[in-house]
């Protein structure tokens, strides 16, 4: 018996390229493996709570970002940042794009001079 709905796991599995015919056993095993993975992640997250009674997002984020086996989840489950930090990141990104744009314009004008 599984706790996650196998029909949803099957739907997710069908989104993969070439996954046209998925057997019941494959869905069952994938569901069980997913449940075991979630259980392991939660256990490791709970160890990170410093004996608190509740597991929160930051506990899971710390596990994901500090253990290489969970590296694939870093993009899906990012660290929380403040609005101020977000604005600073966006400003830096915009500055880099502007710097890149001005260096591209400079290199294009150099090429134009060389082609004359």
Image: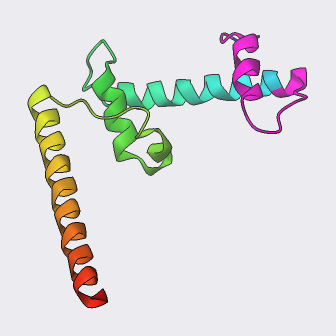
> Toward the viewer: 91 or 47?
91
Q: Quadrant of residue 64?
A: top left
- What's drawn in magenta, residue-wise? 3-26
Where is residue 85 shown, x and y percent of the image? 12, 36
Q: Quadrant of residue 47?
A: top left
Q: Is residue 94 magenta?
A: no
Q: Residue at x 54, y 25 (%)?
A: 38
Q: Is residue 74 left or right of residue 109?
A: right
Residue 116 lies, with reference to residue 43, above or below; the image says below
Q: Residue at x 46, y 38 (%)?
A: 73
Q: Is residue 20 magenta?
A: yes
Q: Is residue 104 left or right of residue 77?
A: left
Q: Quadrant of residue 28?
A: top right
For the C terminus, which image quadrant? bottom left
Residue 78 lies, with reference to residue 10, above or below; the image says below
> Toward the viewer: 51 or 65?
65
């Amino acid at each position: 018996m599984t706790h996650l709905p196998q029909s949803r796991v099957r739907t997710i599995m069908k989104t993969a390229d070439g996954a046209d015919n998925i057997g019941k056993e494959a869905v069952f095993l994938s569901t069980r493996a997913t449940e075991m993975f979630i259980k392991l992640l939660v256990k490791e997250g709970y160890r990170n709570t410093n004996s608190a009674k509740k597991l929160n997002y930051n506990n899971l984020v710390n596990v994901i970002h500090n253990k290489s086996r969970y590296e694939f989840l870093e993009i899906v489950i990012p660290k929380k940042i403040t609005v101020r930090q977000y604005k600073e990141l966006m400003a830096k990104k915009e500055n880099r794009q502007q710097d890149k744009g001005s260096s591209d314009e400079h290199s294009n004008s150099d090429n134009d001079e060389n082609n004359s």
